Amino acid sequence: MHFMRFCAVLILLVGGSVELARGASLDLPEKRYSSNGEPCRVARATNNVQPDASIRVSRRSAIYIIQHIHKACQILVDLRDYSSQVDAIRSELYRDVIRPIYRGHPRIMGVSARSSPKPSHATSRDIPKADAVQLDDKLTRLQNDLMKLGNKKIGEAADEGAGKESQKHFLDAIAELSFAAMIGYDAYPDLFASRMNAVPEVPRTAESDVAFRNGAPPLGVVKLSDAAFALVQNFMRDVRKATGEDHIAAIGWVRQQASKAPGDTAWSDKGPGWILGAYKKSQVPPDVIDTVRGIKIVITADDPAALAGKTIDATNHLLFVRD
């Protein structure tokens, strides 16, 4: 479980899509926009408060950002049981992101919600660094607020099924805000690195050490094929580039995977399988860190004994185990 949580954070936005590893399906129904075209606007909110100065961004990127924020807000509109809390978040999104963008592009009002967002790779010509930082700070804070609210509501759910259903909606809204933030990350990769490094580290505990040891095969009994070695090596190079720090590679089995790219209308359910991630060295007990073909790596599975003498291989960027 610690592995799955960490990978969900680390892989977020890598390669332009959101990827999550969970124990249940994350497929979500397609949502519709509010009839007024402004799902983030809350009638009873104090939207007359003076917003910050306009967020300077190209028209193309402005439409892309607002389309994803609109999708997030529509998901929040449908969370009727949490209306007071999510209305506050919707109002902030409208006041602090959408209105400042509209101030620079008044003609896109009402246009952004009529079509699905198209992938938009941004450069420094699309948004100044200061505005990218401003946008990232606001969206990251509101994503964190949604995550905290979602975790709180999951803990209060009457049963596991209700908790998972609530989790789906919160995760979907968070994903849409992540897509909106990609404009700044595309234009300034160092901004993404600083954001990744600011993610709170999952503390190492006696319980997590036991979980690692119970899931790890004996050191030296698992091999990597040439294809798997290249995949891991390239992934760790990307992690190093994104974070500016060295990590320990990690391969583990998950019961369910799902991914969503910016242009997708729903999550793609990938089913169970092997996933590739990474840990900071401080998060892992040293006795489970193997060295395979010169790569420091942690391998975990539901039945670690079954990996003895096996080879982890890869095809089409997917990992699998063979004799």
Image: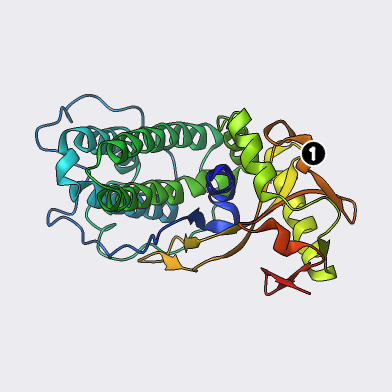
Query: What is the residue that sits farthest to the top in this orientation?
Result: 49
Seen in the picture, residue 282 relative to 83 is either above or below; the reply is: above
Residue 171, image x, y percentages: 38, 49
* Count of numbered badges drawn on the protein: 1
Residue 82 quadrant: top left
Query: What is the residue that sits farthest to the front in this orientation?
Result: 305
In front of the other: 129 or 160: 160
Residue 54, image x, y percentages: 36, 34
- The amino acid marked with disc number 1 is Asp
In front of the other: 179 or 114: 179
Q: Is residue 306 visible?
A: yes
The residue beneath circle 1 is 287
Residue at the location (82% across, 48% down)? 290
Q: Which colour scheme is used?
A: rainbow
Seen in the picture, residue 47 relative to 81 is either above or below; the reply is: above
Residue at the location (66% across, 49% down)? 215
Taking 200 as reference, is 216 left or right? right
At label 1, counting other C-alpha atoms closer than 10 Å, the crowd grade (few under 14, some 14-19, many 20 or more) is few
Q: Is mark 1 on a helix, strand or loop?
A: helix
Q: Can residue 193 be seen in this view?
A: no
Residue at the location (28% across, 53% down)? 161
Query: What is the residue that sits farthest to the left in this orientation?
Result: 44
Quarter the C terminus occupies:
bottom right
Residue 286, image x, y percentages: 78, 36
In front of the other: 75 or 5: 5
Taking 167 as reference, is 198 left or right? right
Taking 109 as reference, is 129 left or right? right
Residue 129, image x, y percentages: 56, 35
